[in-house]
Image: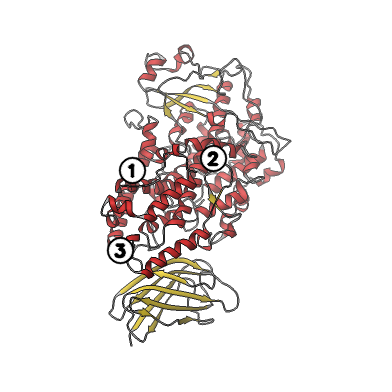
Amino acid sequence: MPSYTVTVATGSQWFAGTDDYVYLSLEGTAGCSERHLLDKPFYNDFERGAVDSYDVTVEEDLGEIQLIKIEKRKYWYQDDWYLKHITVKTPLGDYLEFPCYRWITDEKEVVLRDGRAKLPRDDKTQILKQHRRKELENRQKMYRWKEWHPGFPLSIDAHCHSELPRDIQFDNEKGIDFILNYSKAMENLYINRFMHMFQSSWSDFADFEKIFVRISNTISEYVMQHWKEDFMFGYQFLNGCNPVLIRRCTEIPKKLPVTMDMVECSLERNLTLEEEVKQGNIFIVDYELLDGVDANKTDPCTIQYLAAPICLLYKNLENKIVPIAIQLGQKPGPENPIFLPSDATYDWLLAKIWVRSSDFHIHQTVTHLLRTHLVSEVFSIAMFRQLPAVHPLFKLLVPHMRFTIAINTKAREQLICECGLFDKANATGGGGHVQMVQKAMKDLTYSSLCFPEDIKAKGMDSKEDIPYYYYRDDGIRVWEAIKSFAEDVIQIYYESDEVVCEDVELQAFVKDIYMYGMRGVKSSGFPKVIKTREKLAEYLTVIIFTTSAQHAAVNFGQYDWCSWIPNAPPTMRCPPPTEKGTVTIEQIVESLPDRGRSCWHLGAVWALSQFQDNELFLGMYPDEHFVEKPVKEAMAKFRKNLDEIVSAITERNKNKKLPYYYLSPDRIPNSVAV
């Protein structure tokens, strides 16, 4: 009688093992085996990290094995079991891999296909077509779209983390408890002793150093020492944690009536302001999005303020970007003066602080929350709804969706919800952040997520003109490496553009993202269909880059650049100045966040800047969803390309006082998980 050797690998996660009854049956082209008992309570098989083998004898040869059916029946209480994969050795000595990488959580039968990736057109038998269809039907019941706020990208239909499908939950929910993590961060930084003085002001700038005692971080210390300098102010627009707003100024906007007389002393080339603009030496950052956004009113004891500044910058003869004019509101007028480097020291300093505070708000809510977290969740939900596990694009994308829905759900539960942690320290809390996302949706376009295209659209693509824009340089290299990898995978499974067009599951995935994620807004530029391999490669690159590199670029520098409170105030407690010559050091300190809000802010940027335990970085694919040799070769090539980028960045950063490493692939997690 034919005998099959079945090897079962259990995950190494905590509580991954099981003491329940486990049954297995094999289904092939020539028949189906009986249900075999593999394990029962107290056999000590299927423990955490175990690999167990069994001989399964059948009456007659089953032909080519197509499906494996696994069933778990509880013994005493329900315990989840994380099944990595099953290997089957056939009577002829062939080995078949059946990836799972799922939690077996209930008493339903789980059906697995072998690991070879297949497009819909590749399935010829009815049983495989039916399995494919049924898997998606079940997934679409589990992964439902929901509107969290009007105008937002749609998100998962779950009120809390525990309601999510088990497969996408964190292994340890405590690890992503924001309240716990922020409190622990403040304790580790020895700043919780200030919390009893929640609404009291600091005495002076030096007083802020009291919550800086525990910091031994090169960049944050450098920021503390140099934050007042115009060079440091301008440098952050290129390589800080929000390097996405600066653009080349092609025309001075009418709402910023800067004259040559105002800025002449800042220009170094003996040219007029108009000539400097024409030569491409003038840059602009406009915070118009904040205009009209309601400031936080959740604490009646502390009035908080927002501004919508416009900042004009200049590339000097040293190729450094420095500010030359700041207007703190969108409407010019006598009560909205244009502040200049030639003004009184504290006038100019407070104007820059207001810009830094506004930059912090845009960064947190638009650059970080909307354009990485929420967009990545859209990609994740659509993937689970429309791509079965056997689809090559599911296998390609699933590592880049790890824990994204979970972290966003937890954020909606604790962080950005009504009365959440976001309200404690941020001037855009209490609903302002919701207004900002709603307004920012009009600028969330497909082309703006195409990294090289977005850089070029802002006029920031020339390395010769802007030589120190490391975010651009490293981002382009990572983008190209990801795109090359995507192209290699596409070449393996799609031999022509026609095959792309005929892939109904791919087209459903693309349509889901457009219709639900982007709300069917035509002006978003998101494609409704994809017709060519070239366009598919770009589309996949957008997804992988956004969920990995873009999030890393704007997330993990938060502690570096925002921990020195005056450089990134999360709130301002006095209104913007309406005239020059009146600002004092006391007024600046009184405007900055109080002690309690400073501590919450510092705890937040610390916690958000930490990597997850057992983080998986770009190019690391320990879960072997793919079994084919050509894909594994493409992965090896991808890793080699990434290693070369790491080496180049490491070499460039040598001896730099301000190294830029956020887009070094060895520091880019695969997915949005923090």
Label 2 Cα crowd, 10 Å radius (few <14 / some 14-19 / many 20+): many
Q: Work out whether residue 554 or residue 68 is closer to the camera in this orientation and state it.
A: 68
Instruction: Report the side of 95 relative to 351 (left or right).
Output: left
Viewer-nearest of labels 3 and 2?
A: 3
Viewer-nearest of labels 3 and 1?
A: 3
Label 2 belongs to which residue?
A: 364
Q: Name the residue rendered at 45%, 50% in the picture.
A: 512
Residue projecting furthest to the right: 301
The amino acid at mark 2 is Gln
Residue 616 can be seen, yes or no: no
Residue projecting furthest to the front: 126
Q: CA distance from mark 1 to mark 2?
A: 25 Å
Kindly indicate the quadrant of the structure image that contains residue 63.
bottom left
The amino acid at mark 1 is Arg
Quarter of the image that includes the N terminus: bottom left
The spot of residue 652 in percent (x, y) is 34, 40
